Image (cartoon, rainbow, N blue to C red):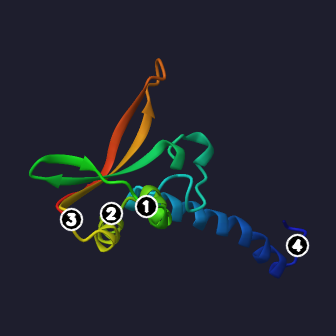
Amino acid sequence: MAWLPPHGRRRALVPPCLLLLLALAQIGGFAAFDLSPWKGGGFGMFATTDHGGFRSVRVIEQTAAGERRVPVPDELERLQRHVREVPREANLRRLAAALRAREPGLGALRVEVWRAEFDPDDLAPSRVRIAVAERL
């Protein structure tokens, strides 16, 4: 880069600096909010199966008679996808509130986000709960 004039050298550093900032933001999002590596410009997205197809959201109504799974209507699909990709407690609560607004008679709700993990030896799948909000 010695052949570039001084202002050219500074401009040449802009793209690598932006990529570094993007990588740091994605790592921070993963660490702080369990953000899927496939979201937020994740550089690790091709090294993992932790994305929407391997994550699921379950909403369970807790009643005196027991528990029952509550289906999420198509109108709330976008919110459900957001909960799946950024499983923060505030987002889980937002989904429960949206369901309650549509169906006020619901009992206490529990919202869970699960992801699939694969055993490194035999690739056997297992499900791991990564977020839960209860008594909503």
Closest to the observer, 112 or 48: 112
The quarter of the displayed image where residue 40 is located = bottom right
**Circle 4 is placed at which residue position?**
4
Between disc 2 and disc 3, whose residue precedes? 2
Residue denoted by label 2: 92
Which is closer to the viewer, label 1 or label 2?
A: 1
- The amino acid beneath tag 3 is Leu
Q: Residue at x 40, y 55 (%)?
A: 34
- Quadrant placement of the N terminus: bottom right
The answer for how far apart the CA atoms under marks 2 and 3 are is: 9 Å
The CA span between labels 1 and 2 is 15 Å
Give the distance between the C-alpha atoms of the residues marked 3 and 4, in whole angstroms.
60 Å
Q: Are marks 3 and 4 in contact (CB under 8 Å)?
A: no
Mark 3 = which residue? 136
Among the two numbered marks 4 and 1 on one chain, the one whose residue lies closer to the N terminus: 4
- In the rendered structure, the answer to whether residue 32 lies left or right of residue 22 reads left
Q: Residue at x 31, y 54 (%)?
A: 70
